[in-house]
Image (cartoon, grey):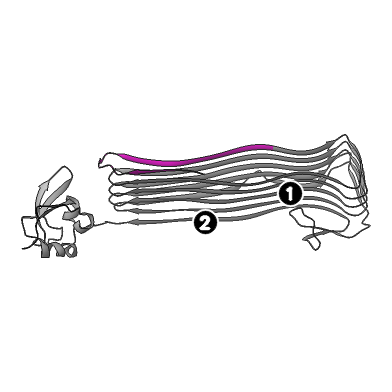
Amino acid sequence: MTGGGAINLSSEEDSLTLAGGLSIGIAERDVDAIVNGAVIHSDGLDINAKREEVAVAISAGVGAAARSDVAVAGSVDVNVYTDNIHAKLSDSYVRSTGDVIVGAKSDMVLVSIAGAVGVSAEGTGAAASFGVSSTVDEIHAYVDNSDVRADGNFRVDAVGNHTVVSVTASVGVGLLKSAVAGQFSLHLVKKDVDARVGDGSLVVAGNNAAIIADDLVTLVTVTGGAVVGNNNAVGVSVSSTNIYGRTVKAHIDDGASVTAQSLGDALGIDLDGNTDNGAELSVNGLAVHAKADDDIINVVMGAAVSGKICRSGLGIDRYQQHHGQGVRRVCLRHVLQARCGECAERRRRFHRRRLRSCQCGGCRRAVRLAVIRCHRCIRARFRPHP
C-alpha cells in the first residue's frame, strides 16, 4: 500500500501542488515437483506442484490547494507476475496399490486499487490514475517415458485459476478554472496449461484414468472518474483486458499406451481439479479433457460538470473588527459577477461609498462599497446603517 498527499495553503498564485502514489509489484517464481529416473513401490503416489497467492496493491494520491494555479494528484499501480509450475514423472518405474496422481496447479487472486483526487479552490484541479498488470503462467503436468501401474486411479492434472479485481478512479475539481481527470486500466494474461502422457510411457490403471487440463480466468475491472470545473471539465477513462497467447491442452502423445480397466467406481472430478462425488465431470474408464473458461466484467464510467460557479461576498468574506469597522476581502471578479439576489443583503445593510455593480445592472444601487484596489483583490471597508 502506497500513498501521497499534499495540501497547499500558500497565497502565491504561481505555485504548483503535486501529490502521488506509486506501487510496483514484480515476482518471478518456479515451483517444481519432479520425479526423474526413480523406481517406486508404494500404496499411492502424489506428485503435486502448487502455487497459491493473494496479492493486494493499493496506491493513492491526494492534492489540494487553496490558491495555487494547479493542483495535481496521481497514482500508479503496476503488477508483473511470471510463474512456472511443473509436476513431472519421467524415466521412472512405478508400482502402486492405490492412486497415482501427477498434478500442477496455480491459484492467483490480484486486487489492484489506484485512486487520485486533485482539488484547487482558485485554480485548476487535475488527477490521473493508472492500474496495470501482466501475468504469464506456465502450468505443466507430465508423465514421460515411464512405466506406471496403479491398482486405483491414474490422473494427470494441469489446472489454472487466475482472478483480477481492479478499481481505477480519479476526481478533479477546479472551482474557478478547469478540471481534468484521466484513468487508464490495462490487464494482460498469458497462459500455457498442458497435461500430457508423453512418448514412451506405459500406463495401466486398475480403475480409471484421466488427463485433465483446465484453466479459468476471471477479470473484473471498474474504471471511472469525475470532474467538476468552472470553465472546462475534461475526463477520460480507458480500460482494456486482454488474454493472449493462451494454450490449454490435454493429450496422450504418439507412442504412449494408457489402459483403464474400470474395476471400481466412477471417478468424479470438478473442473478445478478436485475429486468429488457427483462432480461436473464423471470418469468411468479413460477421459482426456481440456477446458478454457473466461469470466470478464469491464465497467467504464465518467461524469463531468462544467459551469460558472458564482460566489457572493457572503461566501468568501473574512471579517475583522477594528474600532467599529470591518474589513471585507472580495475578488473583483466575483463582485462584478454577483447576482441580484446575492446583493440584497448588501442593499439593506451598507451605505453607498463607491459603486461596484453586477453584470445585469439591476443592482447598481444595491452594492455600496468603499473600495481600495490591491494586486489581486478588492479591500472594502464598510460600516452598518446607524
* Helix, strand or loop under label 1: strand
From the viewer's side, name the closer residue of 133 and 377: 377
Question: At 48% across and 40% down in the image, what residue appears?
Answer: 22
Crowdedness of circle 1 by 10 Å Cα count: few (<14), some, many (20+)? many
Tell me the quarter of the picture where residue 347 sits. Answer: bottom left
Q: Residue at x 59, y 45 (%)?
A: 188
Instruction: Write the start and end of the magenta stretch as one range.
Output: 4-29
The residue labelled by disc 2 is 299
Residue drawn at (57%, 39%) of the image:
25
**Horizontal side of residue 77 vs 372, given as left or right:** right
Figure check: 204 above or below 33: below
| Label 2, residues with CA under 10 Å away: few <14, some 14-19, many ≥20 | few
Q: Can residue 22 be found in the magenta stretch?
A: yes
Do the residues bearing badges 1 and 2 touch, measured as CB atoms within 8 Å?
Answer: no
Q: Earlier in the sequence, mark 1 or mark 2?
A: 1
Residue 348 location (% of width, % of height): 11, 65
Is residue 363 left or right of 259 when viewed as pictured? left
Residue 37, image x and y in percent? Answer: 88, 34
Q: Is residue 271 left or right of residue 229?
A: right
Q: Amino acid at mark 2?
A: Val
Residue 159: assigned label: 1
Q: Residue furthest front?
A: 323
Task: Name the foreground residue: 159 vs 57.
Answer: 57
User: Disc 1 and disc 2: Cα gap in Å?
Assistant: 28 Å
- Answer with left or right where residue 375 lies relative to residue 185: left
Is residue 286 shown in magenta? no
Q: Answer with the quarter of the image where residue 137 lies.
A: top right
Placement of 267 over or under 159, stated as above or below? below
Magenta stretch secondary structure, dominant:
strand
